[in-house]
Amino acid sequence: MAASFDAILIGAGHNSLACAAHLAAKGWRVGVFERAAIPGGAVKTLELTEPGFRHDWAAMNLSLFAGSGFLKQYQQEMVGHGLAFAPVANCFASVFPDGRWLGVGTDRAATTQRIAALSAADAKRWEDLTAAFPDRAQDLFALLGSPMNLRAIAYFGWKLWRRRGVAGSLDLLRFLLSSPRAWLTETFETPELRATLAAWGMHLDFAPDIAGGAMFPYLEAMANQAFGMVLGQGGADTVIRALVAMVTARGGVVECGAEVSRVLTEGGRATGIRLADGREIGATRAVIANVAPGALAGLLPGGSGDARFDAGLAAFAHAPGTMMIHLAMDDLPHWAASPALRDFAYVHVAPSLDQMARTYQQARAGLLPDAPVVVVGQPTAIDPGRAPAGKHVLWLQVRMVPGTILGDAAGQIAATDWEAAKGPMADRALDIVERHAPGLRGLIRARHVVGPLDLAADNPNLVGGDQVCGSHHLSQHFLFRPLRGHADGSTPVEGLHLTGAGVWPGGGLGAGPGFLLARRLAGN
């Protein structure tokens, strides 16, 4: 074998790098091997349109990382390696067909006033939720930051019972099981406020009627108002560059253009990896695979030795796909509802719960949605250095779309292959935005459209363009992510571990799967 490491990590996404950085800080010699030309996975910033216009390839919002346990421990070191954030005060907004809009930001009075213009009762309810959030957040963040095993869950439940009693504990459980629609309709009377918050569920495969999705609209709304949002200064890849520097500063290796073809095993234990170029590299303590759960079988041709585990990973379900549209702009959109919308990091075009539910069902049925949710990211409103002086970039997500096209819900796009369909589908999305921002197309200098299969080709973890590496529905979340008994990333093969968004606590840029695994392996 070639060089040997204490731990080898397959893939250089942010979870792998956070895991490697913590292990290296604990004295482990680590090697990270990535098939792509640059590290980062879905977290990359590239000049996709014209020189000087820096576009976040997929992930843009760094709020979860900014609030993560990993950064709390390593912030000074990461800043020393160049990590820089761009704080956001005007976080997210939604626009509606009748010309109204609603936005949430750190100015609590301004947000409440916007809600009050729609409903005095909803404004009062919003104030009540805001006042209760610090106390409620203790429970939710404790759960989301906890290892997901029976002992940890029992300890969390005991502490919750001590704090809340039986009634309070059951109320929290009911909330965790609720769909976005159930919670939003029993909480607010205004369709616009319900839709503004429900749009966040679509980021995580929680359409309005999916059980277990209420927590995400709630947390996004309350956390954005309380703490603001965070983008990366210059691009989301500020996190990746700092993590790579942390690893290499301690003698670790991050090698790109190095595809792993097999995990080597001996006597039921992982002993290293084989690269596509034929090199074999040993690992004395751990092999850590940051791959979609269903892809692990390709690295273990003989299987794990546990039929239930292998079948469970093979059945791991993915969310519908996403399409990205990257635009180089002469100016930000001129939003018809209000010029104030130009200051928001995100503007959602998702006008109702019913429309979001229909879009989701169309995508699940293999149809190009007739009116997809469009997330308009305006990063240069906050971080102007991502574009030449006076120019801008727009970051558009089209949610949801099918990975495999079976037809078009609108009956207008005949193509069923993404290479031919992504141009017309991008035009459909831009038409939707332009209805709320007249003259949008006249501001576009260049565009780069990324279909769901382009995302998957760049990063196989994004199966079918699923940006969260697996549905977060209750059947494969919490103790069941990726399957019962393995939410800690363990596998039946000794020394082989899973990490990444397919493992608890799941998708997003919080580095939770990587950091929790590294702490378990290192003992702290």
Image: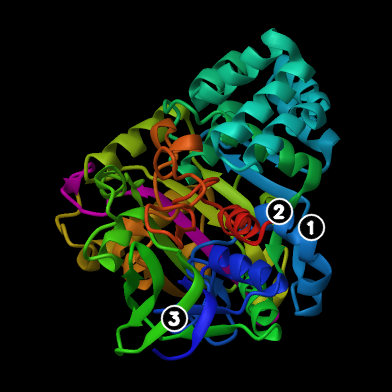
Classify mark 2: residues with Cα within 10 Å, few (<14), some (14-19) or many (20+).
some
Q: Where's the N terminus, which quadrant?
A: bottom left
Query: Which region shows up in magenta?
Result: 388-411
For label 3, the residue is: 282
Task: Answer with left or right where residue 80 lies relative to residue 155.
Answer: right
Q: Is residue 418 above or below residue 138?
A: below
Label 3, label 1: how many angstroms apart (C-alpha)?
A: 32 Å
At a point 40% along the width and 62% down the height, the residue shown is 291
Front label number (3 vs 1): 3
Q: Which of marks 2 and 3 is in front?
A: 3
Whether tag 1 and tag 2 are in contact, CB under 8 A, the answer is yes
Q: Horizontal placement of 67 versus 432: left or right?
A: right
Q: Is residue 408 magenta?
A: yes
Q: Name the residue under label 1.
A: 72
Amino acid identity at mark 3: Gly
- Secondary structure beneath dot 1 equals helix
Quadrant housing residue 168: top right
